[in-house]
Image (cartoon, grey):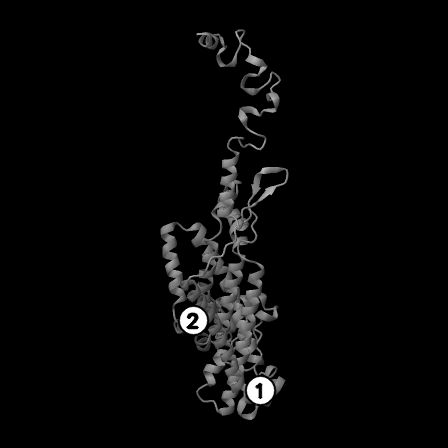
């Protein structure tokens, strides 16, 4: 009975009859100043944020996690023994059979491409050895092509090849960039799919079709442009036409036909779909967040394209341009059908008469002698080395200006 009476007289919840905490212990372990009483943290939590009663369990959990995620059990942080620093896990993912086979296939494919390219160059070099030994350095500086009397060189045909390719790239690059931007950023989705299909189909049209179209249809419609350029810009040596009579309305138009300019435009229409396809793929991958950010900052559509899409697609523009240039340098049938072959260094692109290495080979391959065939192989070797130089230069430029590396948005 005495103990029961004492229990009933004891203040409830550690409080005295006056309402103050019994034995001078602050309520919830907190003194009147707000500090934990007797060094006991509030709610029984230590400074490290881990309950004293839960420390063994937490330490075990940390140790278990470090064993699962790290390479070891982890090490204690100095001054805080209850916290362990996790060490990064070492990834030792073993490659499966499929990964190894795929890697070997890619390696073999890359080696095969290099081997084929080296084999082509070696074949041309061996077959061209006789002609190169006969002419030496004069092979690069002689414009005539008379291999039977050992008077031949590629000065004229290489000049025509480069001029036709430059005209083609000058015309095709703006056309390809504009078409790619229209498809990716302006055209509605339904029209976009139709345009993509049309561009891809244009890239698959045979070159002989472009040659026939340029010879029988396009040439007669572009002579007026050639005459206008010669009349107003004839003071520029590139646009000068010998024998032209700008002030004579009855003057013949034959001085403007079969020119480097006409052949270059036809080749430009051939390479533009290829360039457009490359640029379109790169432009379509421009980050949507940066596009929306440019619009959110008040940019117009052209402002967004100029600040986001074009900087992102710089590598694609360069790569597509160089790809088209390589195609233009080696174009054969369309150029052969349009130009009038001359073996002089022709720098007037509007004037009739031009030539190229590929059309030279196509023209003389059938009736060439043994030495003449060696001379043609030497011309082909020069074109092969020029194409390699263009492609390697493009690769180095693209590697230094990767798409997406810079953006103003």
Q: Nearer the viewer, mark 1 or mark 2?
A: 1
Q: Where is residue 114 in the image (x, y as percent from the top left)?
A: 50, 74
Out of 379 and 112, give the one closest to the viewer.
Answer: 112
Residue corresponding to mark 2 = 214
Q: Residue at x 54, y 89 (%)?
A: 146
Where in the figure is residue 350, as x and y percent of width and height? 53, 71
Q: Residues within 10 Å of mark 1 (few under 14, many from 20)?
A: many
Identify the residue shown where x is 55% and y is 58%. Answer: 402
Q: What element carries label 2?
A: helix
Local crowd size for mark 2, using a 10 Å CA cut-off: few (<14), some (14–19), many (≥20): many
Tell me residue 82's x, y (percent). Answer: 57, 37
Inspect this view and state whether residue 78 appears: yes
Residue 251 visible? The answer is: no
Residue drawn at 46 percent across, 61 percent down: 278
- Residue 158 picture quarter: bottom right
Residue in the foreground of this view, choosing between 33 and 120: 33
Quadrant, the N terminus: top left
Horizontally, is 257 left or right of 82 in the view? left
Badge number at residue 132: 1
Tell me how far mark 1 sits from mark 2, CA to CA: 36 Å
Q: Which of marks 1 and 2 is nearer the N terminus?
A: 1
Q: How many marks?
A: 2
Q: From the viewer's perspective, is residue 361 above or below residue 55?
A: below
The residue shown at (45%, 50%) is: 185
Can you tell which mark lies on residue 294?
none
Residue that extends furthest to the front in the rendered view of this protein: 1
Question: Is residue 254 or residue 153 the one in the foreground?
Answer: 153
Q: Is residue 408 above or below residue 42?
A: below
Question: Which secondary structure lies at badge 1?
Answer: helix
């Amino acid at each position: 009975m005495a103990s029961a009476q004492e229990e009933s007289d004891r203040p409830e919840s550690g409080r005295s009859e006056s309402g103050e905490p019994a034995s001078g212990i602050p309520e919830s372990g907190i003194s009147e100043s707000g500090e934990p009483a007797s060094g006991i943290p509030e709610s029984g939590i230590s400074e490290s944020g881990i309950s004293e009663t839960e420390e063994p369990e937490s330490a075990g959990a940390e140790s278990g996690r470090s064993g699962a995620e790290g390479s070891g059990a982890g090490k204690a942080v100095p001054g805080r023994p209850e916290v362990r620093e996790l060490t990064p896990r070492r990834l030792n993912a073993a490659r499966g059979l499929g990964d190894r086979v795929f890697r070997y296939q890619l390696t073999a494919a890359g080696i095969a491409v290099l081997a084929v390219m080296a084999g082509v160059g070696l074949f041309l070099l061996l077959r061209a050895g006789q002609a190169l030994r006969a002419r030496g350095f004069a092979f690069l500086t002689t414009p005539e092509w008379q291999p039977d009397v050992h008077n031949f060189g590629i000065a004229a045909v290489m000049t025509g090849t480069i001029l036709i390719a430059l005209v083609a790239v000058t015309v095709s690059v703006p056309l390809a960039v504009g078409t790619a931007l229209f498809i990716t950023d302006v055209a509605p989705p339904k029209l976009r799919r139709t345009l993509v299909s049309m561009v891809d189909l244009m890239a698959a049209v045979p070159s002989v079709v472009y040659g026939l179209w340029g010879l029988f249809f396009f040439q007669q419609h572009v002579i007026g442009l050639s005459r206008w350029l010669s009349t107003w810009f004839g003071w520029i040596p590139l646009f000068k036409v010998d024998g032209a009579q700008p002030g004579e309305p009855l003057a013949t138009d034959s001085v403007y036909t079969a020119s480097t300019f006409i052949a270059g435009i036809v080749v430009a229409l051939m390479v533009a779909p290829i360039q457009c396809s490359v640029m379109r793929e790169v432009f379509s991958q421009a980050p949507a967040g940066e596009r929306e950010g440019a619009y959110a900052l008040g940019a117009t559509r052209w402002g967004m394209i100029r600040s986001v899409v074009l900087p992102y697609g710089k590598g694609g523009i360069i790569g597509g341009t160089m790809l088209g240039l390589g195609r233009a340098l080696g174009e054969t049938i369309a150029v052969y059908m349009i130009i009038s072959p001359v073996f002089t260094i022709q720098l007037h692109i509007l004037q009739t008469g031009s030539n190229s290495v590929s059309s030279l080979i196509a023209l003389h391959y059938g009736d060439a002698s043994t030495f003449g065939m060696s001379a043609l192989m030497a011309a082909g070797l020069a074109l092969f080395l020029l194409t390699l130089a263009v492609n390697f230069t493009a690769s180095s430029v693209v590697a230094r200006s990767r798409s997406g590396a810079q953006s103003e948005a």
